[in-house]
Image: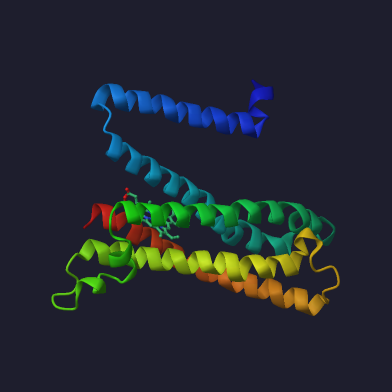
Amino acid sequence: MAAFLGNLRNVVIASFVLAILLVGVYCTTQGYDGPAFELFVLRFLHITCGVMWIGLLWYFNFVQIPTMPKVPAELKGGVTGYIAPSALFWFRWGAMGTILFGIVLALRNHCLVEAYTLDLSEGTAGWPMVPKYLAIGIGMWLGTIMWFNVWFVIWPNQQKALNIGGKYPALAADQKAAAAKTAMVFSRINTLLSVPMLFSMVAAGHLY
Ligand code: HEM
């Protein structure tokens, strides 16, 4: 058992197998409804990627950033050289999976344009015509801004600050510090946006 649990790949596969068993419970108790199930799978994958992304965002902000000043100098390299680059890998690809599944979900719900235009595409008279589109649109904009920050601000600056992949071997210490500061500020902005983003996502489906 310890050998099985020691292998992350096996554990992840087993976790998905357990979820598939629950699909069996759904089919036998509810009956299979193809279109509804397909939409559910997209929503499930969207939220799974979102948990990976926002979980790591909160790990950086609640754990790593505040703890780094207390880590002894000789141990800091373990975090910056090994833990942070690995966390950044799952962080940025979690963000990519979240936005891709989110956009497909909006397309499947026939509300991509309505949501991204905050329902203004339906006209200004009596705006919002469909408050649910406004709610999911706010969430989608916040999530999209956060995704942009991850891929185009935080990741490039972390590559510089931590010399990830050996791309910036000769960067001066002050340039590294400036890059780390920018990454930290945008990571904090994403933490600021994360709660209203999640509120809008969940509210759109359950309050509207
Ligand atoms: C990055 C851009 C994002 C886009 C374009 C997006 C898009 C969407 C869409 C269209 C829905 C409605 C799904 C439906 O009702 O079928 C939704 C729901 C949801 N999203 Fe996002 N999303 C994004 C980011 C996130 C993030 C980062 C999270 C964090 C976990 C998240 C969590 C959720 C949750 C929990 C729901 C509610 C599902 C439900 O109540 O059934 N989303 N999203």
Within the image, what quadrant is residue 34 found in?
A: top left
Q: Residue at x 45, y 63 (%)?
A: 194
Q: Is residue 9 left or right of residue 54?
A: right
Q: Residue at x 43, y 28 (%)?
A: 20
Q: How many numbered callouts? A: 0
Colour theme: rainbow
The quadrant the N terminus occupies is top right
> 167 above or below 124?
above
Q: Is residue 103 left or right of residue 67?
A: left
**What is the quadrant of the C terminus in the image?**
bottom left
Residue 75 or residue 2, whichever sits in front: 2
Give coordinates of residue 87: x percent, y percent: 65, 53
Q: Is residue 180 left or right of residue 58?
A: right
Q: Quadrant of ligand 1?
A: bottom left
User: Could you tell me which residue is drawn at 82 percent across and 74 percent down?
Assistant: 171
Residue 33 on image: x %, y %: 26, 33
Please state which of residues 36 and 75 is positioned toward the viewer in this rendering.
36
Q: Position of residue 165 (x, y in %)?
A: 77, 59
Q: What residue is at 40 percent from the left and 68 percent from the top?
A: 141
Image coordinates of residue 89 in percent, x first then y, are 64, 53
Q: Of residues 62 and 162, which is closer to you in this image? A: 162
Above-or-below relation of 201 to 193: above
Please tell me which residue lies in front, 169 or 123: 123
Q: Is residue 196 above or below residue 16?
A: below
Left or right of 142, for residue 183: right
